[in-house]
Image (cartoon, rainbow, N blue to C red):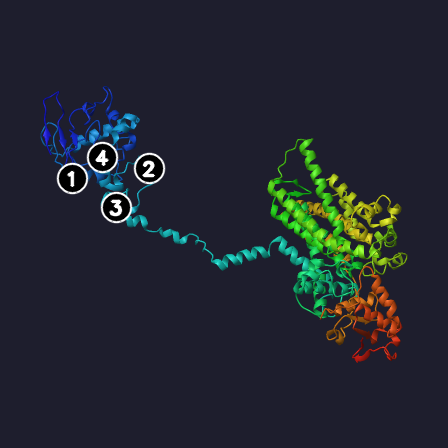
């Protein structure tokens, strides 16, 4: 190190450290110091003009471009804050100590300061810091900040020498390790031992224990629990339990009995079994069943229940077919209840009001007479699809259109459920398709009218439009694919088409809406006289329930729906009832007949009374509005009580409408035992004819054929093909030469005569008739006689 001394007024004494950096002595004003590059600080400026700026206060001391250290060779002092107080956190002292480790204390006058220059250094640092706190950094200062020596020094010091600001130190305090290296004594910035800082609070043991993080099985259990107590889960389970109770004893002997009768249910049990068998073996032959041999497209002779084909894949034989039918019969009631409940909830009804709508829709008294028609009972997809579509479009009857609640996933699901409902049969599905199409058209017209005329801009969304487009195409595609076989059957069998006379024969009069079927436990016996005057009472007893009538009537005056909405629901009820009357409403010239003549496929609907399903659904929504309003009023009254809890009488009052609807839906539906399958049906191959033959006789035969699905001439459906009618006519004299030759022409090889069924029929003498010259054999196999042609 060298010391330069000059006379007064000349250059200030300077010192050089080990790196050769010139350091200005402490004597004199720092403003008079000249930078190393030969430039001088502007006159009249304070020390801050030539210093680094306030951002560099917390930095380890370096050589100032416009001045020197406070005291050359003195021990580095802690940097001061804005108020002139030294910084005690010790984070930047190490760099200063390293820079001046080998320096000696030099007096500015040339002598050695006894105190090591500390007093002057502290005073000078305080003044410099005060000036730095009041001045701002200038571009000139930025240029003077870094020198090659500084960069080397920064690399040598590492992270400790990086520029820091007081704000940086406040925001990101050094860790315990850094603090220890900075102070060199294992203490933090406050002078406390590191161990004391890390020691836990002894009072923390008295605080609440931290919640343990659940493992995967714990999270799975929680999700399962939330799922089990969800409203839709409870509604589905409640619907299923209620269905088992309301249809009892359907599941008491499910392999041997059928609800209502064993004619049409046997046919429908065969339909499910055949669809599963065809899908499992040869899907191309689905529409060409083993019945009605040798007819083609025989599976389309009546509604097919094709949507239940997946169930037909399980099991084989008549007993499994009966079990399958009874299970689907119970599930159909559960789905109807659940679907109507979900629809009412989506539209804005309360839980109890929605339960009333669901139960009244599934267990209306008029449906008891349809217990033998599973394709009529299977109507739960209608309200369920409507609920999903409404939910996907963010619409409800009570709250209107809410774009923020749109979800295209529900739209896709709703269209798929609607397509599935259509696949169960056109008897219920075709009116549903037209209602759905009409709803879409009306919604589009209202939408564009509001946008064009009322200037109401409501978002719809491209993704939602695509969902409607794809879903609608799927629904239409299923309808077209299912309609092709039926149109083919109509061309091959013109007698299968309905005429207006057929519709008139099944059109119910006005008193049908207050007449209950014989299967009603409450009203069946009381309405026996009213049923006796009806031309065909199984299709003309259309009472939806007196309790439902009363609740719907109350919903016209006291409801959560607006007056306009109530009037729309009432109009829908009246339209549905009018169409249900067929030609009985002023000849149907302005109601049913135009639909019959102009809408494609409508002439295939034989029984107009089944349109009562729409009146029942709308009556249920009116009733749900009234019950929901009553429930809300009960909650308001209970909120005024202390405590705010309804009394037992108020609770019972809210449940009373539901109990009335349930009681009125109870039934006395018979469950006859199905005739057992003859052993010969399990061994004899086809083509086969079973005698006696007729509509009611042939349907159990179709059920018996589910073991081997051999070709059988027998068959029962909504109409009788001419060839089958000819077979029944010709074989009345069987066995004789004419009947044998005719059957051989058709390809029939075996004939079974049921000994227990021929009493009082033309085939009673066939078991003992002589076979001379016929070239056939007769064999007794248990309760049947087998003739081999």
Using the numbered discs, state the Cα–Cα distance from disc 4 to disc 1 in whole angstroms.
17 Å
Which residue is label 1 attached to? 101
Q: Is residue 214 above or below residue 572?
A: below
Quadrant in which residue 558 is drawn: top right
Describe the element under mark 1 as helix, strand or loop. loop
> Looking at this rendering, what residue extends furthest in the top direction?
44
Q: Position of residue 472 (x, y in %)?
A: 67, 47
Q: Is residue 87 left or right of residue 519?
A: left
Cβ atoms at labels 2 and 4 below 8 Å apart: no
Quadrant in which residue 765 is drawn: bottom right
Badge nearest the viewer, 3 or 1: 1
Which residue is label 4 attached to? 150
Q: Relative to the observer, which residue lies in front, 370 or 273?
A: 273
Which residue is label 2 attached to? 168
Q: Position of residue 341 (x, y in %)?
A: 69, 52
> If the image is split into quadrants, where does the C terminus sit?
bottom right
Q: Earlier in the sequence, mark 3 or mark 2?
A: 2
């Amino acid at each position: 190190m060298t010391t330069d001394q000059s006379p007064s007024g000349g250059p200030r004494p300077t010192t050089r450290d080990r790196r050769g950096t010139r350091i200005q002595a402490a004597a004199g004003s720092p403003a008079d110091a000249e930078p190393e590059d030969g430039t001088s600080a502007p006159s009249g400026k304070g020390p801050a003009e030539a210093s680094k700026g306030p951002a560099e206060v917390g930095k380890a001391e370096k050589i100032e471009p416009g001045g020197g250290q406070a005291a050359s060779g003195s021990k580095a002092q802690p940097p001061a804050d804005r108020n002139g107080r030294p910084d005690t956190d010790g984070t930047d002292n190490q760099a200063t100590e390293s820079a001046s480790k080998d320096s000696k204390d030099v007096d500015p006058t040339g002598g050695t300061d006894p105190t090591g220059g500390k007093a002057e250094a502290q005073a000078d640092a305080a003044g410099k810091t005060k000036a730095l706190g009041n001045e701002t950094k200038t571009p000139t200062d930025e240029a003077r900040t870094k020198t090659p020596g500084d960069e080397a020094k920064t690399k040598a010091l590492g992270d400790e020498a990086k520029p820091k600001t007081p704000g940086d130190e406040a925001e990101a305090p050094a860790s315990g390790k850094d603090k220890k290296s900075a102070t060199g004594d294992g203490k933090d910035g406050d002078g406390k031992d590191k161990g004391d800082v890390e020691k836990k609070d002894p009072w923390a043991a008295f605080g609440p224990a931290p919640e343990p993080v659940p493992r995967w099985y714990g999270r799975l259990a929680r999700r399962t629990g939330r799922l089990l107590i969800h409203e839709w889960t409870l509604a589905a389970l409640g619907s299923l339990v209620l269905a088992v109770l309301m249809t009892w004893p359907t599941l008491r002997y499910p392999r041997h009995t059928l609800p209502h009768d064993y004619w049409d249910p046997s046919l429908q049990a065969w339909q499910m079994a055949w669809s599963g068998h065809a899908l499992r073996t040869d899907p191309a032959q689905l529409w060409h069943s083993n019945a009605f041999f040798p007819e083609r497209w025989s599976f389309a002779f009546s509604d097919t229940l094709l949507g239940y084909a997946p169930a037909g894949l399980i099991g084989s034989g008549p007993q499994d077919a009966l079990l399958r039918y009874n299970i689907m019969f119970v599930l159909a009631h559960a789905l109807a209840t659940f679907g109507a409940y979900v629809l009412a909830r989506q539209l804005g009804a309360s839980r109890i009001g929605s339960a009333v709508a669901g139960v009244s829709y599934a267990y209306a008294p008029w449906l008891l007479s349809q217990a033998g028609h599973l394709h009529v009972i299977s109507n739960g997809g209608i309200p369920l699809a409507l609920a999903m579509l409404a939910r996907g479009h963010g619409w409800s009857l009570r709250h209107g259109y809410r774009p923020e609640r749109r979800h295209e996933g529900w739209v896709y699901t709703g269209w798929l459920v609607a397509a599935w409902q259509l696949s169960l049969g056109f008897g219920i599905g075709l009116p549903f398709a037209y209602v759905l199409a009409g709803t879409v058209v009306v919604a589009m017209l209202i939408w564009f009218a509001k946008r064009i005329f009322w200037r109401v801009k409501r978002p719809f969304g491209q993704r939602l439009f695509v969902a409607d487009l794809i879903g609608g195409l799927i629904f239409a595609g299923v309808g077209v694919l299912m309609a092709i076989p039926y149109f083919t059957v109509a061309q091959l069998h013109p007698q299968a088409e309905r005429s207006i006379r057929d519709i008139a024969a099944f059109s119910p009069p006005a008193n049908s809406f207050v007449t209950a079927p014989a299967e009603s436990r409450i009203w069946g016996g009381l309405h026996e006289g009213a049923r006796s005057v009806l031309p065909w009472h199984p299709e003309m007893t259309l009472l939806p329930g007196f309790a439902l009538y009363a609740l719907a009537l109350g919903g016209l005056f006291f409801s959560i729906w607006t007056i306009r909405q109530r009037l729309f629901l009432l109009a829908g009820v009246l339209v549905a009832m009018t169409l249900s009357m067929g030609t009985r409403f002023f000849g149907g010239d302005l109601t049913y007949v135009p639909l019959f003549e102009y809408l494609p496929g409508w002439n295939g609907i034989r029984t107009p009374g089944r349109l009562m399903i729409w009146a029942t659904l709308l009556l249920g929504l009116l009733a749900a509005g009234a019950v929901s309003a009553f429930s809300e009023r009960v909650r308001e009254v209970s909120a005024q009580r202390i405590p705010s809890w309804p009394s037992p009488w108020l609770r019972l009052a809210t449940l009373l409408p539901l109990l009335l609807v349930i009681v009125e839906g109870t039934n006395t539906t018979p469950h006859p035992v199905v005739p057992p399958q003859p052993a010969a049906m399990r061994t004899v191959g086809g083509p086969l004819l079973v005698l006696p033959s007729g509509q009611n006789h042939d349907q159990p035969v179709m059920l018996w054929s589910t073991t081997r699905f051999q070709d059988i001439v027998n068959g029962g459906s909504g109409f009788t093909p001419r060839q089958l009618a000819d077979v029944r006519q010709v074989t009345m004299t069987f066995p004789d030469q004419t009947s044998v030759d005719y059957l051989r022409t058709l390809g029939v090889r075996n004939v079974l005569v049921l000994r227990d069924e021929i009493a009082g029929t033309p085939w009673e003498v066939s078991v003992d008739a002589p076979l001379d010259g016929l070239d056939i054999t007769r064999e007794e196999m248990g309760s049947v006689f087998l003739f081999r042609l």
